[in-house]
């Protein structure tokens, strides 16, 4: 996957928040924002919506190899976290927060364990 789009009720507020997270704005219209993620070629976009409909929780994950410093920087800028960085049993270090529209975000660092955890299913050779 290289692109995800979420809805937001206020693009200005969302632009400020996601720039603070470290995403780079590459497209901006009256109804749409697209950001390039700091590493790789993935993009993340936001479309203006009148309201957010509840359809179940969606969580968006952003990986940072400097997670603790990133979280400290965001806290100093006034971002409120639901949980501070913590080591998990699945070998990730992660912190949780919400964006201005209530979308759940996980800032994490998994390193090699993201794609190759010790319990990964062996690839079939057939």
Image: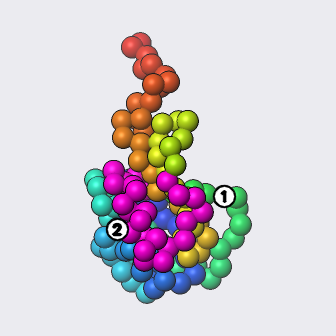
Q: Residue at x 43, y 70 (%)?
A: 74
Please name whichever residue, 72 or 123, is drawn nearer the observer in this view of the structure.
72
Q: Is residue 11 left or right of residue 102?
A: left
Q: How was this image coloured?
A: rainbow
124 to 2, vertically: above or below: above
Q: Is residue 73 left or right of residue 61?
A: left
Q: Residue at x 65, y 74 (%)?
A: 52
| In the image, farthest residue toward the top | 126
Residue mark closest to the camera, 2 vs 1: 2
User: Residue 84 in magenta?
Assistant: yes
Residue 33 picture location, percent across and down: 41, 76
Q: Residue at x 38, y 62 (%)?
A: 70
**At numbered mark 2, what does the secondary structure look like: helix, strand or loop?**
loop
- Quarter of the picture containing the C terminus is top left
Residue 34 visible from this viewpoint: no
Residue 61 picture location, percent across and down: 48, 54
What is the span of residues highlighted in magenta in the rendered image?
62-85
| Residue located beneath label 1 in the image | 57
| Quadrant assignment, res 101 | bottom right
User: Residue 5 in magenta?
Assistant: no
| Quadrant assignment, res 110 | top left
Q: Is residue 89 left or right of residue 44?
A: right
| Residue located beneath label 2 in the image | 22
Residue 19 visible from this viewpoint: yes
Alpha-carbon span between mark 2 and mark 1 = 24 Å
Q: Earlier in the sequence, mark 2 or mark 1?
A: 2
84 to 86, vertically: above or below: below
Residue 41, numbered label: none
């Amino acid at each position: 996957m290289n692109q995800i789009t979420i809805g937001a009720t206020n693009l200005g507020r969302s632009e400020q928040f996601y720039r603070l997270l470290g995403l780079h704005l590459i497209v901006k219209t009256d109804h749409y924002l697209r950001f390039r993620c700091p590493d790789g070629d993935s993009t993340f976009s936001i479309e203006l919506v009148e309201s957010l409909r509840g359809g179940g929780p969606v969580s968006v994950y952003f990986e940072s190899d400097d997670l603790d410093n990133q979280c400290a920087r965001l806290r100093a800028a006034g971002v409120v976290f639901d949980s501070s960085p913590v080591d998990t049993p699945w070998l990730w270090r992660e912190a949780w927060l919400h964006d201005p529209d209530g979308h759940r975000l996980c800032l994490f660092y998994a390193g090699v364990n993201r794609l190759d955890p010790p319990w990964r299913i062996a690839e079939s050779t057939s």
